[in-house]
Amino acid sequence: MNSEGLHLFLHEWDNLPTVPLPERFDFPHQYSPHPWAKAAAQQLQETLKKQFKHAFDQTGKMFGVLVVETPVGLKYLAGFSGKIDNTTVHPGFVPPIFNTTNPNNFYQQGEHALDELTAQIRKIAEGSQLQAHMLQKKQLEEAWQATRTAMQERIAQNKSIRKEQRTAIGFNEVAEKRLNNESKQEQLALKHAKKRFQGELAELETKLQGLQQTIQDLKAQRQQSSVNLQRKLFQAYEIRNFKGASSTVWDIFKAAVSELPPSGTGECALPKLLNFAAQHDLKPRCFAEFWWGASPPGEVRKHRGYYPACRAKCEPIVAFQLQGLEVEPNPIHELMNQSPLEILFEDAWLLAVNKPPHVLSVPGRTGFDSVEDRLKSLYTNLSFLKAVHRLDMGTSGVLLLAKDAATHAAVQKQFAGNKVAKCYEALLKGKPVCPEGLIELPLRLNLEHRPHQMVCYEHGKKAITHYKVLTEGLHSTRVEFYPETGRTHQLRVHAAHQHGLNTPIVGDELYGTAGERLCLHARELRLQHPNTRQDICLQAKVPF
């Protein structure tokens, strides 16, 4: 590859680490930064304070460093995710895989076309013609309502008058014929008035529907244009790996997951760093990604905190990029817990076990070991055996299963009605400000960073957690959690989020720092037995 100007991207350490380099590259989605990568990250952080005018205290950014072997010795590359100050190019940082900010490329032209469609939609939606028609329709409906009411009241009054006239002395057939004719004329006048109103309304609605259909057509055109632009963009992201092979983001995702890449795929720091290294025949040894600045709204990001490569956008790409390198195995495979399941409770309808960490509650797409699969292999006589709730893969403790569909539905109904009392015990990597309290932070899936959850007051589901500090240590705090709701990752986010306890659970690789295990344990479960109607309390001893 052309290495002209390569020296501009190769950075040296002020003080070289003394520890040996790792033998294999980090598993990118769960790792602890190696001292060489940490030293590079800390040195880069010192320059960030001076290099950018960006207000990181308002909007933070993910940065990355990649330690590489070069013909002139060990160096490190620096990169960042997305854009900073509306550009993807900054001196000393590896360039983007595809520069979306170049005004002369198809992407910017496509964005300009999308902006024009948006402007057309807004012009019609907010334009005087549509607003005038909507106002005319409203005024017409109000006028008709008033006219109809007045005519109906007049008809009612005349009907009463005619009724009295019919009882008068000398009332005859001629008078009856006249009164009947008056009644018919009044009904006919109402009918004609209604017909005029419906005709005028239909004319206005035709005009409105024409404008609204134009808006819908433009929106559909914009949606399709956006999809086509994204596809063309992902086909333009050409990725190189360390076997010397090349592919595109589009083809990589198509082969790996048969899904469209999420928006922003290919813009994260690690793929950019690896692609640059592969293009220039530099051998990666280790890496680190860290957050710099304020956390995004709703997410859990700590200033200077180290984070793994995301899975939704990066996992298929990075897996392709790392081909040709020796990479550490997925720690989840190494940590798979093969210890026998401890049975806590069993009768004709229910089965409760003490789920070990690093075992799924129910089978997933990954093919990892699960409690359900293990138990089904043991209870071969049961046609039905299903968990009534779930624990995260890293969480240990009480897991309840039902032996028939009716019992399963009945217990799930108790969970849904918040009639099941749950107590978890956890170690926090820090100390909460208050020794006990209530956390109310609504949660939803972070669509751009699966499987992470995020706080969202607009679209999130209600999530409520009570907590109480049990003991405080030098570097950790033991707490009890009493969740009222059971949202995905609820306790983990409520612990780590800045508006929660602002201190993650020990070993939380998603919202804190990876460790030997996630120190979260479902210690107790209280519910009413759906068949015997007796209260039962299921408990599992805390293993940490």
Image (tube, grey):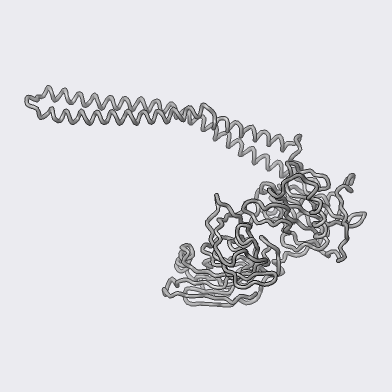
Looking at this view, is 24 or 499 the one in front?
499
Q: Position of residue 536 (x, y in %)?
A: 47, 75
Near-viewer residue (531 or 462): 462
Residue ID at (13%, 23%) = 175
Front one among 510 and 107: 510
Residue at 52% x, 77% y is: 345
Residue 34 location (% of width, % of height): 80, 63
Q: Which quadrant of the figure contains the C terminus?
A: bottom right
Judge whether 251 appears above or below 36 on screen.
Answer: above
Q: From this viewpoint, is residue 373 visible?
A: no
Please tell me in which quadrant of the rendered image residue 475 appears: bottom right
Q: Quadrant of residue 232?
A: top right
Q: Is residue 231 left or right of residue 7?
A: left
Q: Residue at x 33, y 30 (%)?
A: 146
- Give the quadrant of residue 126: top right
Q: Between 282 and 436, which is closer to the camera in this rendering?
A: 436
Image: 184 above or below 104: above
Quick check: can you spot residue 489? Answer: yes
